[in-house]
Image (spheres, helix red, strand yellow):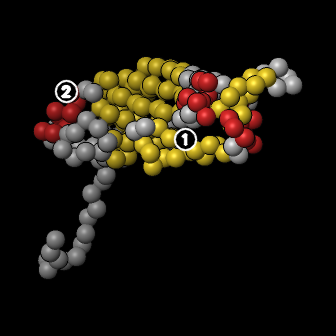
Amino acid sequence: MPGVCRRLGIDLASFRESKGPDRRKTAIPKSGRKKVQSCLKQDRAAMVEVTQSDVKAICGARALPPPVPEQVQESENINVVFLTPKRGSLEGEASKWSFRKGGRQGEVVQATIRDTEFLGKLERGEYRLTGGDVLKVELKERQRVVGADIKTTNEILKVLHYQPAPDQSRMEFDGGPDTKF
């Protein structure tokens, strides 16, 4: 009881202890008082008023058990997969890329590209990615489960092969000599 009262900032000098019918110690206000006011010396504005009916609840209080830390599970896989570009950086930045895994209707995968040689070729314009290109990559997928929350991060460690989309055939226009493009 003294520990609970101390944590609640209750001045024990205002109470006397008595054994109740269940042989537990209880605190009752001294000299027949119906209530006791108490506060911490540092914070007189936070006055606590304790009545006789509050004493039973305080005496029966038990500290809550410490929270159980949530179990964290992690998984990491490296696979060789085929991806088609969906969205990315035109300036060769490593992050903020998305790809489709499994063709045009496949799963969208957000990934960071870690292959600096490939990024350099993109930046220099040697590769110009389109939605029809196919990349064979080494993809590292990391999953972290905390409680019911699953976080997935993907990294393209290495682009093993780049296959540009087939060229579209050029359309011939017969608009006559006055047609300008």
Q: Report the disc number at residue 117.
A: 2
Asked if residue 46 can be seen in this view, the reply is yes
C-alpha gap between disc 1 and disc 2: 71 Å
Residue situated furthest right in the rendering: 21
Q: Quadrant of residue 85?
A: top left
Query: For mark 1, what is the residue?
Result: 38
Residue in the image at 30% along x and 23% along y: 158
Q: Could you tell me which quadrant the C terminus lies in?
A: bottom left
Dot 2: element: helix
Q: Nearer the viewer, residue 53 or 97?
A: 53
**Residue 54 location (% of width, % of height):** 71, 41
Q: Nearer the viewer, residue 33 or 150?
A: 33
Q: Quadrant of residue 110?
A: top left
Determine crowd level at label 1: few under 14, some 14-19, many 20+ residues with C-alpha closer than 10 A: some
Residue 20 in the figure: left or right of residue 98: right
Q: How many marks?
A: 2
- Check whether the beta carbons of the residues at disc 1 and disc 2 lie within 8 A of each other: no
Q: Amino acid at mark 2?
A: Glu
**Residue 40 location (% of width, % of height):** 47, 38
Residue situated furthest front in the rendering: 31
**Residue 137 location (% of width, % of height):** 36, 26
Residue 37 in the figure: left or right of residue 78: right
Residue in the image at 59% along x and 24% along y: 3
Q: Could you tell me which quadrant the N terminus lies in?
A: top right
